[in-house]
Image (tube, grey):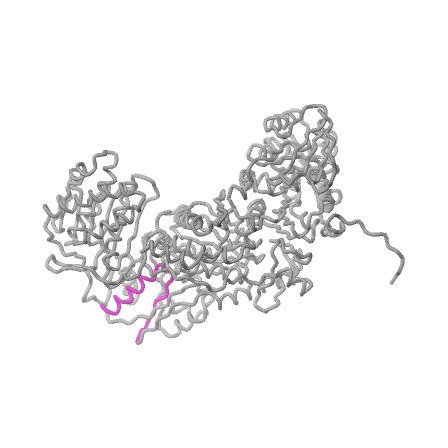
Amino acid sequence: MSTTAVPPKKTNRIGLEVLSYKGGKTTLCAGCGHNSVSERIVEVFFEMGVQPWQVAKFSGIGCSSKSPAYFLNLAHGFNSVHGRAASVSTGAMLANRDLLGVVVTGDGDTASIGIGQFMHLLRRNLPLIYIIEDNGVYGLTKGQFSATSDYGAKSKLGNLNEMHKLDCCLLGIELGATLVARSFSGDKKQLQAILKTAISHKGLSIIDVISPCTTFNDHPGSTMSYAYVKEHDIPLHDLNFIPHFDDIHVEIEDGETQEVTLHDGSVLRVKKLGRDYDPTDKMTAIRTLHEAEEAQEVVTGVLYINTHSKNYYETLNMVDTPLSALPETLTRPSKAALDEIMEELR
Amino acid sequence: MSTTLTSPAQEGGNTARERVVNDFSIQVATANGSGSQTSNTVLMRALFQMGIPVSGKNMFPSNIQGLPTWFTIRASKHGWIGRKKEIDFLVAMNPETAREDCLELEPDRVLVYDEPLKLNELRSDLHMYPVPFDKLVGPVCPEPKLRKLVKNMIYDGVVAYLLEIDMEEIHKALFKQFGPKKVKAAELNWGAAQAGYDWAAANLSKDQPYRVERMNANANKIIIDGNAATALGAIFAGCTFVAWYPITPSSSLVESMIGYLKRLRTGPDGKGTYAVVQAEDELASIGMVIGASWAGARAMTATAGPGISLMSEFVGLAYYTDVPAVIVDVQRVGPSTGLPTRTMQGDILSNALLSHGDTRHPILFPSGPEECYSMAAEAFDLAEKFQTPVFINTDLDLGMNNWMSDPLPYSDAPLQRGKVLSADDLERLGGFERYRDVDGDGVGYRTLPGTNHPAASYFTRGSGHNEKAQYSERPEDYVNNVDRLSKKFESIRGAVPAPEVQYVGGARFGMVFCGTSRDACFESQDQFQREYNLPVSTFRVRAYPYGPALEEFIDRHDFVYVVDQNRDGQLHQLMKLDLDPGRLAKLRGVRYYTGLPIDARSITDEILRQEAE
């Protein structure tokens, strides 16, 4: 035993080291944007002091859906079937509303095979963080177009995409998601801020992360290559997120920042850049996305946030205790209740 | 059909002089949406209240208004509540079908019809009772809009007069049907029933053989449809999560559940101890059930054949990842859309083997409302104990028709929640391996997400995995895992509901059947005994996988007839997975697949035909 003093390891507010937030070794390609997303999740969940075993991770099938294995090993994970993480996570979150749910899917999962489930998930506003690692390509089956591939994009084999693309953020805003953000896997600071916001949000968060595929979609013909996104990325605003447990007094620079208070008391500060962007205004958000598409630009940041809509637990009028934790005394009606029904049926 | 055996006592052929008491079938032919459901239910209930064993079967179209519908009520002093093949007493209200319905009757049967249909021109060998319904309805129903609905109540009065049903019982049944909130509507209908009775008393002679007389066979019985019984079974077994997509004939199951859940499972704070999600499709509903079960809720869905097809991939996931799920399949006629409002035991094979790869799933086969209720609870226990999807195969006949039943018994037996490790268990054990067969029954230990312990987590994946739930493509890990699932299925074999077996002395052959074939098979057994002096043994399958009792039953008979309500003999075919060739050679099939509930006479005749070969 050495008696030499070891410098104390950095721990978060619940006393855990960052190691408690790590996952398995990634098997994705070197430089894959998805790995950056996993890294951001590790950092942010550590910084926010989220209890790892209070988290449930969900995914479908595809490269992106492998990534829940690469963060938060101490959280339960469910790698389900292609395009159906939305329903599996919905069931699990309804069974245990104390969980913090994180879904990681890709554009194939969400925008093609699972588009139906995705759209209905949006309508329910279930508290859940739904991340789309969006590379506009089918990576695991080696490079076919996806439904989020840009019109006019070229595949590695030289095929031209002449189909219109599906914008998951637009759908999210239209159909009831209450936090809708777009980011770029290479933008560390912005993605961290968005993830922190989503953790505090008590409704459905949709985070579409443009995550270029280094193998099949990072070539000059692609509109989702690193070079293209870096050149065309327009951050809407600088984001600063203040968790409610940090005792920080927020200085509001009048006319420069807008604060959005989340359900748990946290404050999202949106610093406007150049224009008067109001993320609580649905029409602005929709217009901004359409304008960006016209201009072949990628707008990133929190596009839309709504903190006053009912979430799904409220809509269903469910007890506060997780259904999975209810005692039998509450879930099994009495003999008297059955006798009464039998009497009515005589 | 040629048989060497002849029946000395075939039913029917009654003359007007011989009275037939409490042993006949009534069929009412109307148009869908004409309000006949109420008058038919009242008629059935009145017989029930008079203590006569009764059953009611609704043959309705996949339509809201206008297409033909038939309701058949059977009164049987012997207690036979399966469908009777022959119609004894027809009420023809629907011009679309009246002619054909009339022509199909056996001679000497009774026909009550709407006078303008002039059915008397078609035949002279029936007891004909024309009734001027339109003339009668005017005075009792001043509101023209309601006349179409009220008109049907008039035949209740006419039938009551002819059969001597006590009008007091019609009154009681009618007011029960409408309930305390619709007294006005009940009174309007009661006026119509009385008008029918009075007119019949003044104008018709009871020159027909069928009569009812009070019995005391129904003491303490209830009337309930199978779907409501399944719903109650699930609720009293502590079900907390339901996801569903509306589909005939299962919709009324979940709708019934929603009603009872609101009543029985709302806490003092006005909040529910449950969640019911009407999902966007059956893929989503089974996905949600799997997610909820995985997270520790008692979760179920209810569907029918087309929904089962859509659930295929997810059911394979639950099987391969050891996640419980309860799936109630109220079977209807397939393939494809098929006949959505007709009955069939059509999903036995598909449910037993649902999904790609090697998969096997247990199925429970309720035969009546009591078993819908008890098997719902058993299905949850089995699903959680064995961490696997469990099917309950009911059918449209059981699910949507009203059945006499003993009162559903209360159970306070502890729920079997299966092998779930708590934080304390983990603290004591230091960790666990999700798919390790610790106890030798093929069932590993699981933890629920949110368990407050750093060692609780594991990763559930539909891809290849080892005992530690880690991704693996190693051949030995794959084999180890699927062999464990096989072993688990053998454990399930010993745990599912046991068959109902009846060995009859001197029986050369036996019948094997499941679900709603029960009543028809027992009646057929009785027909063989009474009409042909042939003893027949019976074996009612209550669950798949079948157990060793089936082999013993086959061994003790020369032949065994497997009765199926489908074309391909699905119950029969499934035996091929388990039985040796010697026993299989002793099996013969009886297959009934008209979309109507199976009847005893069809079984008896088919067995006679095969015996004669």
Q: Is residue B523 magenta?
A: yes
Q: Position of residue A16 (x, y in %)?
A: 74, 51
Q: Inspect this view and state whether residue A132 appears.
A: no
Residue extending farthest to the front is: B268
Q: Quadrant of residue A156?
A: top right
Q: Quadrant of residue A232?
A: top right
Q: Nearer the viewer, residue B127 or B583?
A: B127
Q: Position of residue A105 (x, y in %)?
A: 63, 43
**Left or right for A206, reference A39:** left
Image quarter where the N terminus of chain B lies is: bottom left
Q: Position of residue B12 (x, y in %)?
A: 18, 59
**Left or right for B530, reference A313:** left
Q: Nearer the viewer, residue B597 or B376?
A: B376
Image quarter where the C terminus of chain B lies is: bottom left
Question: Is most of the magenta stretch helix, strand or loop?
Answer: helix
Stretch in magenta: B506-530
**Left or right for B267, reference B509:** right
Q: Is residue B545 magenta?
A: no
The residue lying at 49 percent from left, 53 percent from top is B300
Q: Position of residue A104 (x, y in %)?
A: 64, 44
